[in-house]
């Protein structure tokens, strides 16, 4: 059997590095497209079909990349929500235009599937509701807006070309980075675990009521594999745990894991107590992705333990 060729843009990024490793271990011929530098991890590199370096904004370069005739492209490049508040022309040159140009280029080179990573932030403010993929989008920030536009471009190419476009609305991922340079310590679970490990306390930057749905990086990889391998045709998937927790809930879970592991009861303090409001719990429905075979492999407790394992082995 010829292994399917997968191109992963943002291939050495936080989600990309793990996804490339996962798909390579599952027998795919994976090409990470890296930006600014190629990772130094020889073991990771040895598993890849080829590793390339370049800028997705460079259309001439992307034309050359497309000559390799990929079956699947997973697009993971985006500025994060802080960087996306930059100038509109710069932000759209990274977050939006390449989605269009890549679909234009690769649809003419026989691409089978284009998997676009979007975000649950495209839904905007959520109430106590079950959020399915058919909910009207209502992004409330520039980051969500650019993903909302990226989704529209995918929908257009899905309708008008032979490329099967799939949109992944990811909730909040977490987990130890594969590479030290990965931009991931601002993610809530990662940040709180590191704070617990280093400072021996958990200080929240809110009253603890904001809500999140957390999914471990390895589960994200399994979800993408399900989307690659399913014969079902769906345009959009929520990729979430389906369980909504408050930041205080997650702090308490980290405290409980820490107590079992190290025998220490960590203090938790929340700032901004005066503005305490009780958030209603929404649920990011994941029944569609579960219907194509997605199952969780990692509980939150296991994911938190993995983070502490990482912190022990990489103690600065
Ligand atoms: N991490 C999460 O929890 C999360 C949640 C929801 C959605 N997402 C989405 O998933 C995708 C991947 O997220 P991530 O956390 O891995 O982000 P990341 O920042 O770690 O990865 C993005 C990668 O893109 C690269 N890149 C930036 N500009 C580039 C360019 N011009 N050309 C080529 N590469 C370029 C960066 O170097 C980086 O490696 C993004 O679209 C993000 O919006 C992530």
Image: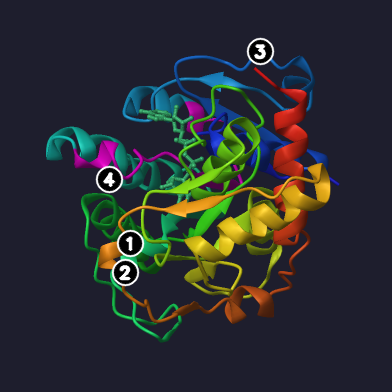
Look at discs 1 and 3 and give the one toward the viewer. 1
* 76 in magenta: yes
Q: In this view, does 56 lie above or below 84?
A: above
- How many marks on residues? 4
Q: In this view, does 131 lie above or below 168?
A: below
Residue 250 in the figure: left or right of residue 42? left
Can you give x and y, in whole percent of width and height, for residue 41 in the image?
71, 17
Between the residue at mark 2 and the residue at mark 3, the CA separation in whole angstroms equals 46 Å
Q: How crowded is mark 4: few (under 14 residues within 10 Å), some or many (20 or more)?
A: many
Q: Give the range drawn in magenta.
A: 65-85
Identify the image quadrant of residue 309.
top right
Report the residue at 61% width, 43% height from top.
193
Q: Which label is found at residue 273? A: 1
Q: Could you say whether the residue bearing mark 2 is in a helix, strand or loop?
A: loop
Pointers 1 and 2 in contact (C-beta within 8 Å)? yes
Between the residue at mark 1 and the residue at mark 2, the CA separation in whole angstroms equals 5 Å
Q: Which of marks 4 and 3 is nearer the N terminus?
A: 3
Q: Earlier in the sequence, mark 2 or mark 3?
A: 3
Q: Residue 69: in sight, yes or no?
A: no
Q: Is mark 4 within 8 Å of ligand 1?
A: no
Look at discs 1 and 4 and give the one toward the viewer. 1
Between 148 and 282, which is closer to the camera in this rendering? 282
Q: Which of marks 1 and 3 is nearer the N terminus?
A: 3
* Location of mark 2 (residue): 276
Between the residue at mark 4 and the residue at mark 3, the CA separation in whole angstroms equals 29 Å
Q: Earlier in the sequence, mark 1 or mark 4?
A: 4
Between the residue at mark 1 and the residue at mark 3, the CA separation in whole angstroms equals 45 Å
* Location of mark 4 (residue): 96
């Amino acid at each position: 059997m010829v292994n399917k060729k997968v191109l992963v843009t943002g291939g050495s990024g936080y989600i990309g590095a793990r996804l490339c490793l996962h798909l390579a271990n599952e027998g795919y011929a994976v090409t990470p497209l890296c930006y600014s530098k190629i990772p130094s991890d020889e073991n990771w590199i040895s598993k890849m079909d080829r590793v390339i370096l370049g800028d997705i904004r460079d259309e001439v370069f992307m034309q050359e990349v497309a000559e390799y005739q990929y079956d699947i492209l997973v697009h993971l490049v985006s500025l994060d929500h802080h960087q996306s508040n930059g100038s509109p022309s710069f932000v759209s040159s990274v977050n939006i235009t390449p989605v269009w140009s890549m679909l234009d280029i690769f649809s003419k080179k026989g691409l089978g599937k284009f998997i676009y990573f979007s975000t649950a932030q495209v839904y905007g403010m959520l109430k106590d509701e079950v959020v399915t993929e058919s909910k009207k989008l209502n992004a409330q920030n520039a980051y969500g807006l650019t993903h909302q536009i990226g989704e529209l471009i995918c929908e257009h190419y899905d309708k008008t070309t032979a490329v099967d476009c799939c949109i992944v609305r990811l909730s909040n991922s977490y987990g130890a980075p594969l590479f030290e340079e990965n931009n991931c310590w601002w993610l809530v679970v990662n940040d709180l675990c590191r704070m617990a490990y280093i400072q021996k306390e958990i200080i929240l930057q809110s009253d603890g009521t904001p809500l999140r749905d957390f999914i471990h990086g390895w589960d994200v990889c399994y979800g993408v594999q399900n989307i690659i391998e399913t014969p079902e045709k769906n345009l959009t998937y929520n990729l979430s745990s389906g369980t909504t927790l408050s930041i205080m809930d997650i702090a308490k879970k980290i405290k409980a894991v820490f107590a079992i592991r190290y025998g220490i009861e960590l203090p938790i303090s929340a700032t901004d107590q005066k503005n305490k409001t009780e958030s209603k719990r929404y649920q990011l429905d994941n029944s569609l992705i579960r219907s194509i075979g997605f199952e969780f492999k990692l509980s939150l407790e296991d994911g938190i333990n993995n983070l502490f394992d990482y912190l022990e082995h990489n103690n600065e």
